[in-house]
Image: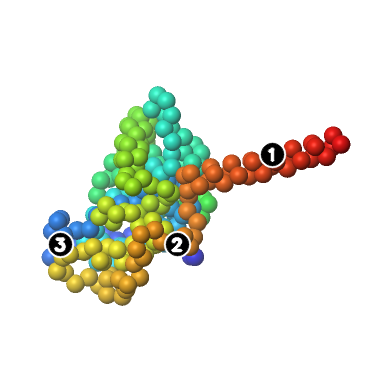
Amino acid sequence: MACRPVTTLFLIFFFLFTSSSASRILPSHSQKVSLGLYYESLCPYSANFIVNYLAQLFETDLISVVDLKLVPWGNAKLRGNDTFDCQHGPSECLLNTVEACAIHAWPELSEHFPFINCVETLAYQHKYPEWESCFDKLNLDSKPIADCYSSGYGKELELQYAAETNSLEPPHEYVPWVVVNGEPLYEDYENFVSYICKAYKGTTVLEGCSSVSLNTIQKGKAKPVHPDCYEKGMLAFAARITSAITSWMDRMNMVASV
């Protein structure tokens, strides 16, 4: 699947669309569909979803009827003294916090999404150590992010996201965990546009829904067709490997002692 890097053309389209929307008749807030993405910055499947799927919202008029909320926490685990560990290590904790700071510093979606999309593009390309290059690429001031992170406020934001993620009902099982109007899409999350179109109750005819078949929506938990970043599944898999190795070593020791 091809990666979609942040390009000048993408940004021009993004800002033209958001600025021109003021002259359109937009749906009222009550008609909008809420879309929540619970993710972690270095999960390759989270990065893939943001770069190759979620960014499609900005290529049509769908973004005008969606309240999108990004929650960068994922499968991180709280420890004592308000500290936490991240599934993919300290670099993920850093980038989760940086993205939380971006959402806080630039609360408008048109401001923080291009930055997060840029960082996740680098993660998708396995170039995440270059994440600071996104400031120059997007002509953004890095100071608000640096201040947020160094002051410890970014950590407070992450703890808030931890509480929000851990209070999900039903609880999240993996990331990316996509929720439309409070309902999780499970493994059918790549089909999120169909759920948005089905949930939208406004009268505006949406071009972004014209080619979507609502019959493709699967009920309940869809059959997994691709891997995700599991929280418990990976631990269980590691435990099975450890058990198998231990069993094999026991058999080898028995043979050696005969």
Give residue 223's mark. Answer: 2
81 or 57, nearer to the observer: 81
Disc 1 is placed on an element classified as helix
- Location of mark 3 (residue): 27
Give residue 73's mark. Answer: none
Percent position of residue 120, x then y: 43, 52
- Location of mark 1 (residue): 246
Query: How far apart are the two marked residues, 2 and 3, measured between alpha carbons?
Result: 34 Å
Tag 3: residue type? Pro
Asked if disc 1 and disc 2 are in contact, CB closer than 8 Å, the reply is: no
| Mark 2 closeness class: few <14, some 14–19, many ≥20 residues within 10 Å | few
| Figure quadrant of residue 203 | bottom left
Name, please, the residue furthest toward the bottom: 211
Question: Residue at (27%, 71%) from the top-left corner?
Answer: 209
Query: How far apart are the two marked residues, 3 and 1, measured between alpha carbons?
Result: 60 Å
Query: How far apart are the two marked residues, 1 and 2, measured between alpha carbons?
Result: 32 Å
9 or 39, nearer to the observer: 39
Left or right of 62 on screen, residue 226: right
Tag 2: residue type? Lys
Left or right of 43 on screen, residue 240: right
Percent position of residue 229, x then y: 48, 50
Question: Residue at (35%, 70%) from the top-left corner?
Answer: 216
Q: Earlier in the sequence, mark 2 or mark 3?
A: 3
Left or right of 203 on screen, residue 248: right
| Mark 1 closeness class: few <14, some 14–19, many ≥20 residues within 10 Å | few
Question: Residue at (74%, 39%) from the top-left corner?
Answer: 249
Q: Earlier in the sequence, mark 1 or mark 2?
A: 2
Q: Earlier in the sequence, mark 3 or mark 1?
A: 3
Disc 2 is placed on an element classified as loop
